[in-house]
Amino acid sequence: MAASTESMENAATSLEVVLESLQKGIVSDTQVEMMRNLTILFREQPFRESADGSFFHHLLQILCQATKVIQPHYITEKCFTPTDEFLQVTTECFRCQRNACVECPKNQNSMRDLGFIEVTIRILDKLQKLPTVLSHKLEALRCGMQFLGNAAAGNRECKEDIWKLTFPDFFVTFLGYDDEKVVAYCSMVLFTCLDDGKAEQFLNDKGIEVAFQIINQCAKHPDLDWLILIITQFFLKSFDLVERLYGKLNYQERLRLLELVYSEVEDSASCMKESVVSEKLAMFLADHFQHSCKSILKLEDETAEVDEECHIIIKLLNILCEMTSDIKKFMFLQQYPEILKITVELLREVHLSGKTKKNIFSGTHDFAQIRTVSHPAVGFKAYLIRLIGNLCYKNPENQNKVRELDGIPLILDNCCIDGNNPCILYRCMRLLLTFTVTLHLLNITEKNLLQSKNL
């Protein structure tokens, strides 16, 4: 503890030296190095715990003084020489703030009380207007954003302050910023501050703009975890929000949203927990599949390219298959005969198309001629059969509906090994087993002899 006290005394002296230089408008490598040393010291828990309000008061003075010197240059591209040096001091201040918050509520509260949060947000807004030729601009933006994220972590008061000062305009600006790390850290701040009550604010005009930015950036940067968490843990809970967004998204954004719906449903099922996706959203997606699914038939022309609409249809089919895989929350979809009917009809049309001319829907038994599995429509028929099977599972009414639609001969005709539809034989057998009772014959259900007669 004595060593920490001595280090803090030396650190306080360094702050006074830096502040004095800044007040004279002078910054050299010496002052920058002093600030870097402080950043390193704040990585140690004992040093963080020894910091007091007086120390942070001096740190805030340095931050304000450094950015005061920068201010005259943020609109013009003149006088760059001093600005980069002052930016380095600003960056190191942000790093000190960021490190001081780690697992230290005392420092979070102290900096909040002194006004660090408001000052930092104001400075970040100034920094993003600086000319892009300044080499330390991005570094300062990233570190300032990290401070806000660390200040909010586990601290309700800081979260509330940051949210009030940033939502929505701050997020509109920085989620659209042309730097992946700035976007990542900004989304970290948003997610850390977010809760179910605040999520309702995305439904207002400015809030919807933030939501668009989040999905847009998630489509551009599909591996940014914070964006994924915002969408899967908050957006997908709100049918009203998804409905407002869906029609206005471009195809890339819409496809990314659907990928996240699929992943959330799949992950929830594998973890045996209830999906956050609502029944309303499930029905919404089923309706879109019903009304658009036959557009997939454009692929019967072998030269046709798989456009965005086809990708959407395929992803919607995948989602419906996953939802109806005996997940109790979504089995209500069995009660909508239109879904089953359109699926059987589509299977019949793609199967006929593949038999009448060679295309992606044609079966192939020559495995040397199998199409590359990168084609998104590979397996499409197998997924249709999977959906039919899921909708018929333990549902005599739907099983009878398949019989009435002459679906069983269609399924039998697809009961083969097909290189363009991996697992189709397995899917057909699973579906046909749904209809089997005795004598190894196909029957509509365990207790329905009508299907046996039909076969």
Image (cartoon, grey):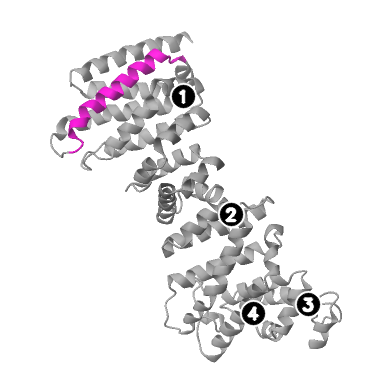
Numbered mark located on residue 344 in the image: 4
Give the residue type at disc 1: Gln
The residue at which mark 1 appears reads as: 108
Q: Relative to residue 327, is residue 57 depicted above or below?
A: above
Residue 276 on image: x %, y %: 61, 51
The quadrant of the image that shows the C terminus is bottom right
**Disc nearer the start of the sequence (1/3):** 1
Q: Which residues are magenta?
A: 50-75
User: Does the magenta segment cover residue 71?
Assistant: yes
User: Does the magenta segment cover residue 379?
Assistant: no
Disc 2 is placed on an element classified as helix
Q: Residues within 10 Å of mark 2 (few under 14, many from 20)?
A: many
On the picture, is 134 further left or further right than 207? Answer: left
Tell me the quarter of the picture where residue 6 sits.
top left
Give the residue type at disc 2: Glu
Disc 4 is placed on an element classified as helix
Numbered mark located on residue 452 in the image: none
On the picture, is 81 further left or further right than 305? Answer: left
Front position in the image: 48 or 122: 122
Front position in the image: 333 or 233: 333
The residue at which mark 3 appears reads as: 435
Give the residue type at disc 3: Phe
